[in-house]
């Protein structure tokens, strides 16, 4: 980068006229008129301003210890919670789900968000049975090059156990063949 060139005589004269016509907003300590300053055609090197002293800052105010919500222990939500009448109806496929959430084809983050939002909406509607389509788990194949298959299916029970709606879930069951079989699950919500 080139150093800046100095002002020519004409430029310095024009600058002096402009500077003289300006009225300062705040009076400065030293009022040296621009006309008394000698203007040289060579650039003037200005020494950098001294750095201000570092002042000791007062310590930040003390805050009360943060209250951390207790971590909810993941309870086994797949077992129990239903009477035999519900179990028979779910196993036979004779009951239709109130809400269906299709997570198949979504990424893990999108599927998790969709699951939480969907269960929240189902609870708000007063739904009792939610069918969640996750996709069938596939066996790992050596030719698969370690790409993950059935990732949503493997994570969904953890999401449900640790999610914000865990206390509203009465039971989780494998869905009937006509509702998706191994590729879907029923979530029975508490009233």
Image (cartoon, helix red, strand yellow):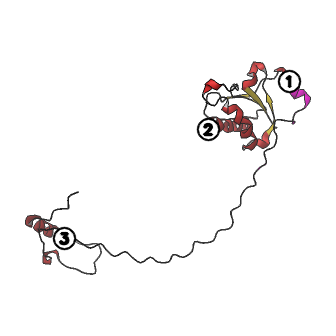
- Sequence-wise, the earlier of marks 3 and 2 is 3
Asked whether, in this view, residue 98 is left or right of residue 63, the answer is right
- In x, y percent, where is residue 20? 16, 72
Asked whether, in this view, residue 156 is left or right of residue 80, the answer is left
- In x, y percent, where is residue 74? 78, 45
- Sequence-wise, the earlier of marks 1 and 3 is 3
Looking at this view, is 159 or 31 the one in front? 159
- In x, y percent, where is residue 14? 12, 65
User: Residue 44's mark?
Assistant: 3
Contact, mark 1 vs mark 3 (Cβ under 8 Å): no
Q: Distance between the residues labelled 3 and 2?
A: 60 Å
Query: Residue most toward the right?
Result: 84
Q: How far apart are marks 1 and 2 (CA)?
A: 33 Å
Question: Which residue is tagged 1?
Answer: 89
Closer to the observer: label 1 or label 2? Answer: 2
Query: Residue most toward the top?
Result: 178
| Part of the protein shown in magenta | 72-88
Q: Quadrant of residue 173?
A: top right
Disc 1 crowd rating (10 Å Cα; few below 14, some 14-19, many 20+) is: few
Asked whether, in this view, residue 45 is left or right of residue 131, the answer is left
Closer to the observer: label 3 or label 2? Answer: 3
- Sequence-wise, the earlier of marks 1 and 2 is 1
* Circle 3 SS class: loop
Disc 3 crowd rating (10 Å Cα; few below 14, some 14-19, many 20+) is: few
């Amino acid at each position: 980068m080139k150093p800046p060139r100095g002002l020519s005589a004409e430029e310095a004269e024009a600058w002096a006229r402009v500077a003289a016509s300006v009225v300062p907003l705040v009076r400065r300590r030293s009022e040296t008129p621009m006309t008394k300053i000698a203007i040289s055609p060579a650039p003037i090197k200005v020494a950098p301003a001294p750095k201000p002293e570092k002042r000791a800052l007062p310590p930040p105010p003390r805050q009360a210890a943060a209250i951390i919500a207790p971590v909810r222990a993941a309870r086994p939500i797949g077992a129990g919670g239903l009477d035999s009448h519900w179990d028979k109806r779910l196993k036979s496929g004779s009951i239709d789900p109130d809400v269906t959430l299709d997570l198949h084809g979504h990424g893990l983050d999108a599927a998790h968000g969709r699951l939480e939002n969907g269960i929240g909406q189902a609870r708000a509607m007063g739904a009792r049975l939610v069918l969640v389509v996750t996709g069938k788990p596939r066996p790992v194949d050596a030719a698969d090059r370690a790409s993950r298959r059935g990732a949503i299916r493997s994570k969904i029970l953890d999401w449900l156990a640790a999610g914000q709606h865990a206390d509203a879930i009465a039971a989780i069951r494998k869905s009937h063949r006509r509702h998706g079989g191994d590729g879907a699950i029923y979530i029975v919500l508490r009233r």
